[in-house]
Image: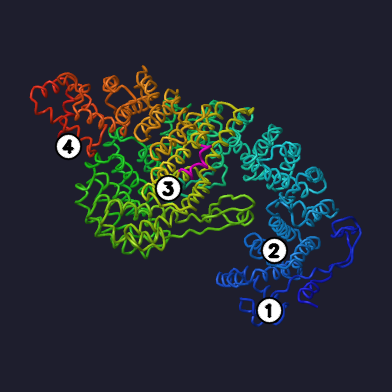
Amino acid sequence: MGAFESAAGAAGPRGEPGAERGAGGSAPFPSAGGAAGFPPPRLPRLPVPARPASLSFPFAAMAATAEQEQQQFYLLLGNLLSPDNAVRKQAEETYENIPGQSKITFLLQAIRNTAAAEEARQMAAVLLRRLLSSAFEEVYPALSPDDQTSIKSGLLLIIQLETQSSMRKKICDIVAELARNLIDEDGNNQWPEVLKFLFDSVSSQNVGLREAALHIFWNFPGIFGNQQQHYLEVIKRMLVQCMQDQEHPSIKTLSARAAAAFVLANEHNLPLLKHFADLLPGILQAVNDSCYQNDDSVLKSLVEIADSVPKYLRPHLEPTLQLSLKLCADASLSNMQRQLALEVIVTLSETAAAMLRRHTNIVAQAIPQMLAMMVDLEEDEDWANADELEDDDFDSNAVAGESALDRMACGLGGKLVLPMIKEHIMQMLQNPDWKYRHAGLMALSAIGEGCHQQMEGILNEIVNFVLLFLQDPHPRVIAALLQTMEDQGNQRVQAHAAAALINFTEDCPKSLLIPYLDNLVKHLHSTMVIKLQELIQKGTKLVLEQVVTSIASVADTAEEKFVPYYDLFMPSLKHIVENAVQKELRLLRGKTIECISLIGLAVGKEKFMQDASDVMQLLLKTQTDFSDLEDDDPQISYMISAWARMCKILGKEFQQYLPVVMGPLMKTASIKPEVALLDTQDMENMSDDDGWEFVNLGDQQSFGIKTAGLEEKATACQMLVCYAKELKEGFVEYTEQVVKLMVPLLKVRGPEYLTQMWHFMCDALIKAIGTEPDSDVLSEIMHSFAKCIEVMGDGCLNNEHFEELGGILKGKLEEHFKNQELRQVKRQDEDYDEQVEESLQDEDDSDVYILTKVSDILHSIFSSYKEKVLPWFERLLPLIVNLICPHRPWPDRQWGLCIFDDIVEHCSPSSFKYAEYFLRPMLQSICDNSPEVRQAAAYGVGVMAQFGGDSYRPFCTEALPLLVRVIQSPDAKTKENVNATENCISAVGKIMKFKPDCVNVEEVLPHWLSWLPLHEDKEEAVHTFNYLCDLIESNNPVVLGPNNSNLPRIFGIIADGEIHEAIKHEDPCTKRLANVVRQVQTSGGLWTECISQLNADQQAAIQELLNSA
């Protein structure tokens, strides 16, 4: 008998017929049928692990048989569960070294051995599911077909024989995971037996088997693959029947969860969602029933539907909302259940705001529920004078209610929420119970973001009312406000007041703060002195920590206006850094270091130098002890930022300290965050308190990253940039060290160094453009990529790069058009309203911003590669042509024209082969209603004249009267139109300069001169002034006029250009203009005539021009 058969036999009697057995019949799984019994089953033979020589774990060498190996494996499972970290770590290493195929064998044998310890069997089940989830392709296909069949049939049989409910669920998870991996690319389920098992089990009289079938379907609702449509009615009937099972609550609950999972898995299949709409009442009933059985799993499923498929709820939205309200209001339920019920409504306010806005009665009932939760506060006599700020209890009703109110106000908007909540808040603020007053004030704060537009109109009323509470007898109410820091009887109130001051001054304009600066500083100083004494006498530091940060914030905003107060604070701050060395004062010391460096930056080097040496020595001492600091020491991040500020203050003098600061800085920048790819069940077992954050990747998988230390890493990287910028060549000794950190394996300096760095980054940048989901991050990556191409130039991309990039840009453009279509569909939705339009406009703005980055990348490629890149571009051509169609939104036409502008500018004369696509739209767009489109079209005509070649001549002639029409329009120089107008003026100048035979230059020149100067579009201003210099230097009679009579007017143009800083002084054009002025200066009377016709500002501008050039 084989080892696995022995182990099966050792498990004890298994085959006696009994009530839990079903009828056999012809089905391959007898227990899934009717009522008759069957003989004792013989488990299928599983693949025997390789002999000891092939095993890589230590005990294998001593094992003579598979059975002995299995016994050793049971010991290993026990060690994996050991509370002893060393034992567990050793067991984990041993387990990892077992070959994958052997793992399957050992794990399966452990799972089906009911004589083994329950904990070991459950651990084996979890490990097998993880193995199939993370390493299926490495392990399963390598098994022989017979072994694969044996595993599949063995798992299904184990489910039938398992008597422990929790264990059966874990085996079902394994089956679901295996089934997920056995759906091929075409959607074929390569395990048809599992579908037969589902249908047989769900009809079984055995409740355990019905639970198993539903659990598998819940875990993997896509199990039917491409046969789903064929089985749709069967699936629906199965779920409906199970949800109607009044005798077995577990079946009802599981079927509701399975139905919800099926809906979520098919969220984009609208016909299916409509077909399954009549399942929702059964799901809602299960939500209600399960909550009163202390099970919130179905309620969580409802929250997921509200989040991902809110439209599914529409046919039964009223009962969904009413149920949520009822559960939320029921104090007999747990806080978590009540909060989850509220979460359904709040989530809908974010994902289906327009739909929810139609049910104002529900919103009106939900708001008092949130406020009632916010009143759920505990009395704490020691609260007012506690010296530690405890973290918010995010499980508390008060925090949940406040968060819900904030989110609902943002989701539904102030027009709806503010009128509903205003009276409630006013009543709460007049309640004799402090909890209501506190909740009322916090509610005002919570709705501030979502209702800000509506609150602006009544802000004076709100502020005056709130100020009455500055004298409130209960300290918790005062802490909800920005109020006095001198309430010595309530330490927490002082700390809150200082924190409120920090929030205020951080965003407060300097001009607004200055009038109150003297009084504010006096209060801060007096509070600091008192609190410093309390620190020395009592060891209390909470208020002092906040006050020190308040001082830093005020100095940061006041800048040089803080100089008179410098000597008031610096001695005390230095004293704190020097003496606050105890562990419990680390945060205070870190904040004080931050404060000193911010004050130094605010007052400047001259004032700070008197203390710079002392401060640097204090920092150096801390830095020297850096290796002794614990990893979570708050001083580390404050130190890193402080060094960077000191670098800005001291400039080149800071270079001497680099050897000391770079070590710890590089260590922090080198932090490698922990990452993990987890399935949904593993993720649920990991607490958010462990510092992990997760991104759902779909298909039951999530990417996790441990964020502890990431903020410090980001700060350290920013500091490295700061040192490099400030010290320039003084930083050169560290460049290789930094690059090795940022871009591993690079050693060569000079141009080759730059090239190698680019080669290392290029692939990753292109892939990131294709995969980055966050639009803000994506736009930054695209911008960086475009700038890199401009720096690296021709040859920086190979054929593979172009191929991949072309596909990605094509995808971005196609996505752009698709998103526009989806927004148009949403505008036809029955829930469409004004606020939906606002959110659609935000989406559109985000899409357009990505379109601008596509344009940036194409610009950098055209400017670097010129016309040889045109064959590559042609795969994108139809999409760019689509952008400039007359029916497209103006941003599309603007950026489409910009792309063709770049082609004309950088790829001519070859660009003319695309003239049939863009020339007519470009000329028609010169007079477009949108100034942005006019600007792009006018710029195109200008580069057409400058770079286009002879083929474009007739089109320059045709464009001229259109350009003039725009320039002479009555509102041509208004703020929104001026840039487009100036591009038209510049384009006329370029036609005259580069295609003079296309126009009557003598006729046009006087008009062109009257339109000058340009001062908004600096780039085009340079072109026009250079052309003006050309004309003057060639003594053009039309420009100079009879007897130089136009020179005073020309002086006025030059002076106005200087006043508006149209041209930078370092530009060669400035020197040319100055030479024109100097030439006239030598002519005596003409100079006097020109200057006398200028006003005082213009005369000063001419003098500034002469001085600068």
C-alpha distance separating marks 3 and 1: 54 Å
- Determine if the magenta segment contains residue 995: no
Q: Type of residue at label 2?
A: Ala
Viewport quadrant of the C terminus: top left
Which numbered disc, 2 or 4, marks the residue closer to the eye?
A: 4
Determine which quarter of the picture holds residue 1107. Answer: top left
Residue 638 x %, y %: 36, 53
Cβ atoms at labels 2 and 3 below 8 Å apart: no
- Residue 845's place in the image compared with 3, above or below, is above
| Start-end of magenta stretch | 870-879
Cβ atoms at labels 3 and 4 below 8 Å apart: no
- Determine if the magenta segment contains residue 872: yes
Disc sitting over residue 401 in the figure: none
Q: Residue at x 73, y 74 (%)?
A: 48
C-alpha distance separating marks 1 and 2: 24 Å
Please, what secondary structure does the residue beneath circle 1 have? loop
Dominant secondary structure (helix, strand or loop) of the stretch shown in magenta: helix
Give the residue number, with chain letter if any, for mark 4: 1109
Cβ atoms at labels 3 and 1 below 8 Å apart: no
Q: Type of residue at label 4?
A: Ala
Give the residue number, with chain letter if any, for mark 1: 51
Q: Is residue 276 visible?
A: yes
Q: Residue at x 42, y 22 (%)?
A: 927
